[in-house]
Image (spheres, rainbow, N blue to C red):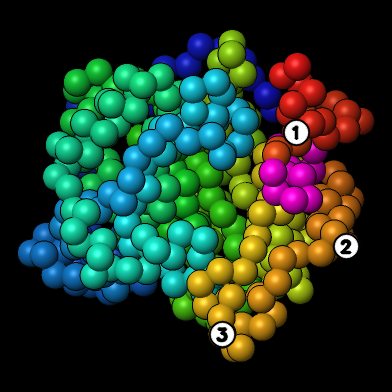
């Protein structure tokens, strides 16, 4: 369903009720024997022990900026307020941000206090950003929540976007219920073997599906927009088409349709290009090229065959988004966002 109404950021209600501080403290307690993500490395990050993701007690912020590369309903006219965390709990061999996700010796220099992270959020809001979009937040979920608390006490009121690789802990997500307004998970693989080969984690299929099921429990299939068409609350599942169908797009779409809802919003992405190890290692030759137009059209056809008609898709070259302007009418074709804005 599509809804349009003025919406108050959920974390403000938690703040007023005194619940937000309880959630923050519960999340921070998980850092003592780190179970923040399914790696469950049990290191004591409160004592500055380094977890399997090479992260400790303080958040690492590689950069923060108004960003215009996300889905149109997040970008609007002034951009999403992206905060890029350093490090990652995955080790994707084709990561397009590997310079910040897999260079922990460099990223340790970018540690910031919770208060500084809150200042970044307020600065982005002050610059007109329509939301705060935390990119790769999984391994810093408690630190993120603490900063949201600090910022909310000082006037933050825009939606929080949790832009994740979906290798998340259900227990953590339950504590983030109504702390996060918009979930933006990237469902990478439909099989565990691919998750291990290309992202170096076990049981990706199981854990990502459990995590996205929890996100769906919190939001349902409704997208809530304001009067400007900006997304205020909801779930968008991103599917990046990989060469040689390594991601298993059809299988993921079938799971979404049959287990969640055919009304869940999908963002189908064509922007893959070989980088990092995928561009240099013969071990990953199946990922060493861009996708073909045939592979892209096969993914588009699967989306249409499933009857999933809410969401966005990129052009084949990944340069722009298409979307359905009338989510309630499955006969409405995907439309170029530039036509809608003209």
Which segment is the magenta one? Answer: 308-319
Q: How many dots with numbers? A: 3
Instruction: Let me know if residue 204 appears in the view.
Output: no
Q: CA distance from mark 2 to mark 3?
A: 25 Å
Q: Which residue is mark 3?
A: 281
Given this view, does label 1 or label 2 mark the residue nearer the observer?
2
Query: Among all residues in the image, which is located at the extreme bottom?
Result: 283
Provide the major secondary structure of the magenta segment. Answer: loop
Helix, strand or loop at disc 3? loop
Q: Which residue is mark 2?
A: 294
Mark 1 / mark 3, whichever is N-terminal: 3
Mark 1 / mark 2, whichever is N-terminal: 2
Q: CA distance from mark 1 to mark 3?
A: 36 Å
Given this view, does label 1 or label 3 mark the residue nearer the observer?
3
Q: Residue at x 61, y 47 (%)?
A: 237
Q: Residue at x 83, y 51 (%)?
A: 300
- How many neighbours does mark 1 have within 10 angstroms: few (below 14), some (14-19), or many (20 or more)? many
- Position of residue 120 relative to residue 15, above or below, is below
The percent position of residue 250, horizontal first and vertical second, equals 78, 61
The percent position of residue 1, horizontal first and vertical second, equals 69, 27
Q: Does the magenta segment cover residue 310?
A: yes
The percent position of residue 155, horizontal first and vertical second, equals 25, 18
Q: Does the magenta segment cover residue 288?
A: no
- Position of residue 168 relative to residue 342, above or below, is below
């Amino acid at each position: 369903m599509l809804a349009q109404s003025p919406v108050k950021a959920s974390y403000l209600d938690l703040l007023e009720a005194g619940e937000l501080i309880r959630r923050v403290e519960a999340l921070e307690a998980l850092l003592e024997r780190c179970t923040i993500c399914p790696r469950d490395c049990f290191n004591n990050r409160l004592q500055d022990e380094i977890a399997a993701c090479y992260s400790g007690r303080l958040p690492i912020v590689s950069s923060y900026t108004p960003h215009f590369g996300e889905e149109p309903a997040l970008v609007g006219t002034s951009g999403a307020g992206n905060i890029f965390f350093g490090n990652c709990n995955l080790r994707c061999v084709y990561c397009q941000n590997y310079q910040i996700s897999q260079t922990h010796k460099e990223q340790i220099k970018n540690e910031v206090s919770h208060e500084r992270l809150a200042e970044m959020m307020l600065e982005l809001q002050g610059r007109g950003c329509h939301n705060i979009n935390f990119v790769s937040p999984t391994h810093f979920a408690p630190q993120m929540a603490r900063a949201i608390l600090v910022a909310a006490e000082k006037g933050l009121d825009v939606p929080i976007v949790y832009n994740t690789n979906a290798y998340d802990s259900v227990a953590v997500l339950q504590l983030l219920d109504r702390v996060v307004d918009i979930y933006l998970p990237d469902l990478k693989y439909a099989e565990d073997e691919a998750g291990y080969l290309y992202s170096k984690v076990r049981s990706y299929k199981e854990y990502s599906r459990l995590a996205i099921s929890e996100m769906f429990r919190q939001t349902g299939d409704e997208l809530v927009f304001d009067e400007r068409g900006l997304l205020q609350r909801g779930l968008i599942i991103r599917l990046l088409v990989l060469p040689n169908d390594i991601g298993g797009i059809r299988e993921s779409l079938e799971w979404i349709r049959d287990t969640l809802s055919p009304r869940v919003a999908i963002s189908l992405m064509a922007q893959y290009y070989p980088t990092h190890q995928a561009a240099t290692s013969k071990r990953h030759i199946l990922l060493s090229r861009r996708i073909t137009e045939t592979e892209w059209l096969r993914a588009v056809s699967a989306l249409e065959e499933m009857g999933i008609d809410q969401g966005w898709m990129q052009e084949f070259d990944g340069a722009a988004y298409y979307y359905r302007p009338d989510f309630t009418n499955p006969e409405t074709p995907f439309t170029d966002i530039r036509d809608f804005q003209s």
